[in-house]
Amino acid sequence: MIPKIGGQAVLEGVMLKSEKSMAVAVRDMAGKIVIKTKNLVPNSKRLFLYRTPFLRGFLQLFSLLILGMEALKFSVTVLEGGETKKRDTLLFAFSAFVAITFTIIFFFLLPFYVTHFSKKYLIFLDNSLWFNLYEGIIRIIFFLGYLLVISLMKDIKRVFQYHGAEHKVISAYENGDELIPERVIKYSRFHPRCGTSFLILVILVSVIFFSLFKTENIYGKILLRLIAFPVISGFIYELLKLEKISLFKVLFIPGLWLQKLTTREPDLEQIEVAIQAFKALDHKEV
């Protein structure tokens, strides 16, 4: 079985990650592709927690967030043509904190407060099942609305194109095809093993989670939503590892639909950047 490759799009580039390394390729303002690589410690050689089912999912997600912010910082540095300053590092650390806080508030706490407020006008929300279902619908609406709004931004459209390029390169690699832009571009921009699939599954599973672990105390409900993300993300991580089993392929359908928003068809130059990131990667068996 070939080693799995993951990644994400950054500004004018792509970050790809294997078990042993990370590579970021960014096209600078002069048209040159600039590459940064970093060696990583394989999970098999890390703390046992990274190999513990259900716990490893959240730890992996947190690690990917750190790598993602590092890759994004590199892309900004390349595009600005400058050196990374201590002030920039602190700014990105603060940005990561703001991003996490925004995610918790906007996608978990705010839908809860909207649903709780709606109880004054919708009697059926007194039933915990309907309450959680209604909250889940509100959360999905917020998520889709957020994606629709940012997809209108010019810079984000290009990031979404690089997202598509990332998926095409990974698909070509997984199919054993030659990695040249003219061949890679023929592959689909949609890929089941994508962060988009992960996020929408977290939102959907949260409806079931809040129904199973319910409390009538409002502060208990808030606390439950704060701890929900690491618990649910660990569960989803284990589900996504079953991607090859036909019975579980249905789990990827919502994420593939949603990738119509989070990806765009890339051009050959964008695919070339993604290919260069892949070639700089150490993707041999651990």
Image (spheres, rainbow, N blue to C red):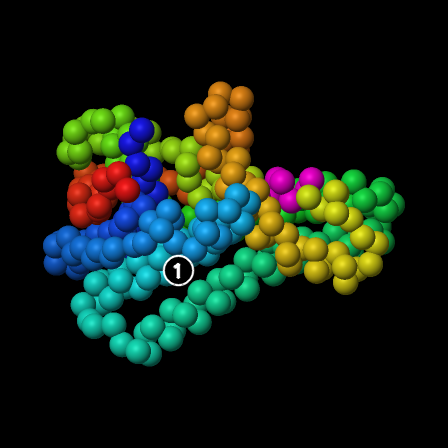
Q: Is residue 171 magenta?
A: no
Q: Quadrant of the N terminus?
A: top left
Write the residue at 69% across / 40% down: 208
Tell me which residue sits at (46%, 52%) in the image: 48
Location of residue 226 by image quarter:
bottom right
**Secondary element at tag 1:** helix
For the point 46% across and 42% down, the residue is: 196
How far across and how far down the image is residue 74, in percent? 26, 62
Judged from this view, the residue extending furthest toward the top is 246
Residue 90: % across, % down: 38, 75
Quadrant housing residue 166: top left
Residue 274 visible from this viewpoint = yes
**Numbered range of the magenta stretch:** 202-208
Q: Residue 55: x, y in percent?
A: 54, 49
Q: Which residue is tagged 1?
A: 66
Binning the other alpha carbons within 10 Å of mark 1 as few (below 14), some (14 to 19) or many (20 upward) gives some
Q: Is residue 58 left or right of residue 10?
A: right
Q: Residue at x 17, y 43 (%)?
A: 279
Quadrant assignment for the C terminus: top left
Determine if residue 10 is in view: no
Answer with left or right where residue 179 lies relative to residue 16. Answer: left
